[in-house]
Every structure is written in C-alpha cells, then in structure tokens.
Image (cartoon, helix red, strand yellow):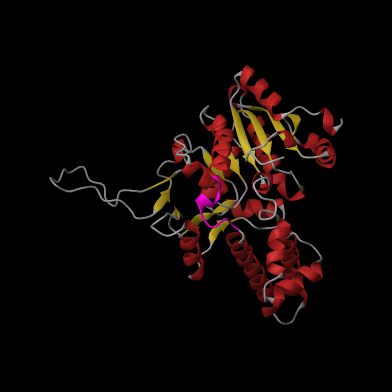
Amino acid sequence: MLFNELQSYAEIIDHLNKDKRTKHLLLGNGFSISYDSSLFSYNALSSFIENTDDELMKKLFKAINTKNFEIIMKELNIFASIADIFSSDKSLADKIIKTKQKLQHSLIGAVKTLHPEHVFKIPKKKSESCFNFLNDYLSKKGLVFSTNYDLLLYWVLMRNDAKHAIDGFGKELLYRSDEFIPGREPEYTEDLIWGVHKDDQSIFYLHGALPLFDTGINIIKEIYDGNFLLDNINNRMNKDEYPIFVTAGNANEKLNHIAHNQYLTYCYDKLCSVNGSLVTFGFSFGDNDTHIIDAINKAHNKPKDKRLWSVYIGVYNQEDLNHIEKIKNKFKCKVNIWNATTLNIWENNL
C-alpha cells in the first residue's frame, strides 16, 4: 500500500458516523507536536537538558548516544542490575537509580519550561479548532485517551467549557451526616480529588500529566488559585513533589508503573474496555508501547455487544505506514490506516 492512497480523516469519520458506531480517540505525542513541533518533541526536551549546566545529564546523553529519555532510563536500569551483581560497592546501584530519578525529574522540568506559559498563549482560533475536533467524540459519548504529559488537552477543554469532558476530579465533602443542621453550609476539600466523578469520566491521561499528583492518600489535580497553573506545579516540584508521570523505558516497565497507581490503573482498564472503534492520532505504536496494543486486544476480546471492532491509525508518511503494516498482525481487531496529514487540528497554515 502507498501512503498517497490512504483515506483522509474526513473519509474515515464519515464512514464511522454513517455506521453509527461509538468512536473513541487515542492521542499520542503527535497531537502536541502538531501544535508546535519546536516545543513538543523528544529532541526539544533532550536539547533543553543538554544545554543546562548539569554535566551528568550531558554525559549520559553522550555516552548512550540517544535523544530518547526512555532508552536512557532503560539503560540505567540495566546498569543498576549489573552493578548490584558485580560491584563490591553496594551503594553503586543506589547511585545509578538515583541518577535515573534525577533524569525523570529533569524531564518533568523540561516539559514545564518548554511549555506555553498559560492557557491564553494558545490563540483562540487554534483552541476552538482543537475543541471542535475533540468534541466530535465527547459529545457522542466517546472517550478521549492521551499519553501526553503536557497541558494542551486540559487547557483546550477548560477554555472552551467542554461540558462533556469529565476527568473524574472534583471537590469532596469534608463531612457526611444525615443530620440536618440549620444554617450550616456544606464544606468541601480545597483540592480537586480524583474519584468524585470517575463513573462519568471521559478524559483519561494514560501516562499521567503535569497537573496530576499522588499524595499517597488521594490523587489530586492542581488548580488555579490566582496564579498560573504552571507556577503552582513548579511550587510543588520545588517541595520535591512530582506529577504522576510514566517515564519508564519499555512497555513492561510502563505497565508496572501504571499498576502501582490507582488513577493510572483505572485509565488503562478503561482503554481495555472500550467498544465500537478507536481512532488514533499522533501515536506511533513503537516498541515501547506494546502495552497499548495489549489494551486494544483486551477490548476486542469482550462480548460482541461490548467489543472494540476496529482501530483507525493515523500515519504521517510512507515509513510510518510501513511500520503499521509490519505490526498489523499484533492487533486482534481490524486495523485501518489513514493519512494523518489530512487532519489540521490546530488550523495551522499548511
């Protein structure tokens, strides 16, 4: 199959709408890159780290010779295991693990620093265009899944008052009582806590996101309080609090991270249970993402009335197309491939 022979986004959506099949959306890094490729990419993140004064980070990139954070962290895990077996200095493995943790924290800092300063830095026209794209799923009872860490999706939904976009977070009552007390107003938590609206949840951050934090008791979402959201996130990071952020190397490591967090587990399980059809945009289905294919296959293995029947994968060029053709047999549902260059989410000048 040739890339220029693929269907356009408009054609596949027209087909799905005519079939009246529920459609869901999976967003990968290409969603953010399509907004601004100079900001949202692994190369941009690694360039940020390389240009800092942290010599250890620079040496790591040079020694392992890659721009991929996940590969570096995978290598550090291997080094730690070898050091634990062969080194007489048992503290060496701990030092390597701490280096990996430092890299994870640096990645979070890089995402934050390279991020648009606040929601209104996104032009209104772009925000509205993106919202219209997302709302075509949300308004028809579709679910939206994202593997991105940044705030773009969150900002677009909040700015456009997306009534069908529910992320599961809300304020909980500080007390519950059947006793009526005249004049006493209900009191709520200051934090937005996950779980309050999870039964109606339609937005799922599969690998976490910048505003989501695990307190050890609750999963909370950072909120605006007169300061920019990124400022509040930065304040937490300065106190050694870090967002829920899946940065492990291979699919098994990612899945292990997911399994140890109640929010991430819930999101992943929801992907494992979608029905109808799943449209993907900007998601490469690389070697480190087989856990996503596993989730799609679990969704297909459901009873017929609750089954995921097909996946529509967007690709940008012939190389991407060849890759998906090569791995099609890993999917148990029907795989359709479409031309991702025909979708202009942000109304960019093409």
Asked if residue 117 lies in the magenta stretch, the reply is yes
- Tell me what residue is drawn at x 48 percent, y 62 percent: 231
Residue 212 x %, y %: 50, 54
Residue 32 x %, y %: 64, 48
Q: Is residue 253 visible?
A: yes
Q: Which residues are magenta?
A: 115-123
- Residue ranking furthest to the top: 18
- Left or right: residue 74 versus residue 26 is right
Magenta segment main secondary structure: loop
- Tell me what residue is drawn at x 39 percent, y 58 percent: 226
- Residue ranking furthest to the bottom: 89
Q: Quadrant of the N terminus?
A: top right
Give residue 190's quadrant in the image. bottom left
Residue situated in front as seen by the camera: 280 or 77: 280
Residue situated in front as seen by the camera: 124 or 298: 124
- Tell me what residue is drawn at x 58 percent, y 39 percent: 130
